[in-house]
Image: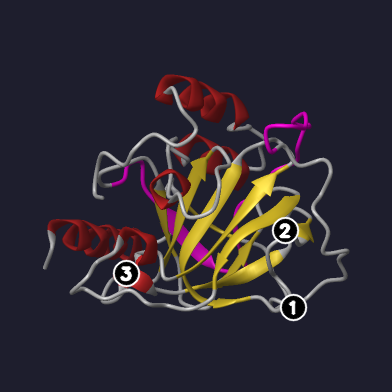
Amino acid sequence: MPCRRLVAVLAAVAALAAGCSPEGGTGGSSPAPTAAPTSGAPAGTVATGTTSPQAARYTFPLRGCRFSFSHGHHDYPATDIFAPRGCTVVAPVAGMVDEVTTSDRWSSRSNRGAERGGLSISVVGVDGVRYYGSHLSSLAAGVVHGTRVDAGRPLGRVGNSGDAVGVPSHLHFGLSWPTGPGVWWIRRGVVDPWPFLTSWRDGGNRSPAAAVRAARVRAGSSTPPCSVNC
């Protein structure tokens, strides 16, 4: 079993043994993912480099289930939030749907980076941050590129698609700045989400916008080359 997969399995087992740990919680009830009325047009308030970021209200990206997450991730900044398969994944902030992967094409033989997330979705928030969730079991109806969403809008359901096959179901959650399509090594995560997830779980409203802007400055480019787990 690859080291990364073994770490994920051990983290999930520890979460189950501990129940609701300090890094865990129970989300509120949530309806099944359904399409909501939307204009389908790009949101003029979403920061994409030509618009100004807005203040935002945040919510935890899972609803209606017990979950657990830890401080740290293999290889690059991100968080795996372990939860039962089928748990509702929601938009953590208002914004616009960016990239959506509707089919799981990952193969262990090719292990292409662009396909490791399986079913996935990203949302560019009104705060200028891109929020990425992957390894989903399904996507909500009507969630396509350009769809405007409010915080808490169902986006899909937790699973273990992509290279999470054989690993306990979880949501891979990543924070980054917006890029053009297909820049998966940035989309997967450039800033540790743990302090922000902890805040939202506890009812806080800590924003990752400043941390993501700082990471972008350090990178020196909006699309630096992939340097780890490529």
Checking the image for residue 164, the label placed there is 3
Select label 2 or label 1 by which is in front.
Answer: 1
Picture residue at 45% right of the left edge, 49% below the top? 183
The correct choice, above or below, for 146 with respect to 93 in the image is below
Q: Confirm whether residue 108 shows in the render.
A: yes
Looking at the picture, which amino acid does disc 3 mark?
Ala
Rate crowding at label 3 as few (under 14), some (14 to 19) or many (20 or more) other CA atoms within 10 Å. many
Which label was assigned to residue 151?
Answer: none
Q: CA distance from mark 1 to mark 3?
A: 25 Å
For the magenta stretch, what is the residue range?
Answer: 48-73
Q: Residue at x 26, y 50 (%)?
A: 230
Is residue 71 in the magenta section?
Answer: yes
Q: Name the spot of residue 171 as percent of width and height, x first.
A: 46, 62
* Residue at the spot of label 1: 34
Give how far apart the Cα atoms at labels 2 and 1 are.
Answer: 12 Å
Q: Main secondary structure of the magenta part?
A: loop
> Of label 2 and label 1, which has the lower sequence position?
1
**Rendered image quadrant of residue 75:** top left
Quadrant, the N terminus: bottom left
Q: Is residue 151 magenta?
A: no
Determine which residue is flagged by label 2.
Answer: 152
Distance in Å between CA atoms under marks 2 and 3: 25 Å
